[in-house]
Amino acid sequence: MIGKAEQRETPEGKWLAEAEIEACRQELEASFLREKEIFEFKRAEILERLDQMEKNTLSEVDAERCTFENRRNDILSSLRAELEKRYETFLSQLRAEELVAELAQECVDSLLTCHAQVREGIA
C-alpha cells in the first residue's frame, strides 16, 4: 500500500491524473456542446413550426373575416333592396295630389275662419 500512495504523490502520478481529468473535462465539454447543438436545432424547429402555425392562423382569420364581410355586404344589399321596394310601394300608394289638395283646403278653411273671427272682433 505504501508503494501505491508514494506513486500517486510522484510528479509522474500527478501528471497522469491531470491528464485524465483534462480528458474527462474535454469529453464533458464535447458532450455539452453536442447537447447544446441538439437543443438549438430543436429550438429552431419549434420556432419554425410556431411561425407556420401563426401564418396558418392569420390566413384562417383573414379567410373568416372575408367571409363575414361578404355575408355582411349581402345582408346590407338585401336590406337596401327591401327598403327600396317598400319605399317604391309607399310612393305608389301615396295619394300625393289628393293629400296636397286636402291640406290646401284645410289651410284655406283655417284662413277663412281666422279672417271671419278677426272681422267679428273688429265689428
Image (cartoon, grey):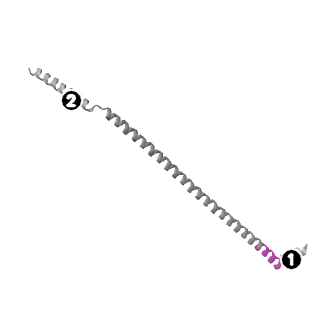
- Name the side, left or right, on which 118 lies relative to 50: left
- Name the side, left or right, on which 67 lies relative to 39: left
Q: Where residue 46 appears, x then y in whole percent?
A: 63, 59
Q: Quadrant of the N terminus?
A: bottom right
Residue 11 within the magenta-colored segment of the rendering: yes
- Name the side, left or right, on which 103 lies relative to 44: left
Categorize mark 1 by other alpha carbons within 10 Å: few (<14), some (14-19), many (20+): few
- Identify the image quadrant of residue 91: top left
Please report whichever mark, 2 or 1, sits nearer to the chain's N-terminal start.
1
Q: How many marks?
A: 2
In the image, residue 61 above or below residue 96? below
- Identify the image quadrant of residue 115: top left
Residue reaching furthest to the bottom: 12
Categorize mark 2 by other alpha carbons within 10 Å: few (<14), some (14-19), many (20+): few
Dot 2 corresponds to which residue? 104
Amino acid on which disc 1 is placed? Gln
Residue 86 within the magenta-colored segment of the rendering: no
Dot 1 corresponds to which residue? 7
Q: Where residue 8 appears, x then y in whole percent?
A: 84, 75
Q: Where residue 121 appears, x then y in whole percent?
A: 11, 21
**What is the C-alpha distance between the residues marked 2 and 1?**
134 Å
Q: Which residues are magenta?
A: 5-22
- Nearer-the-camera pick, 5 or 99: 99
Q: Residue at x 87, y 76 (%)?
A: 6
In the image, residue 88 above or below residue 106? below
- Identify the image quadrant of residue 16: bottom right
SS for callout 1: helix
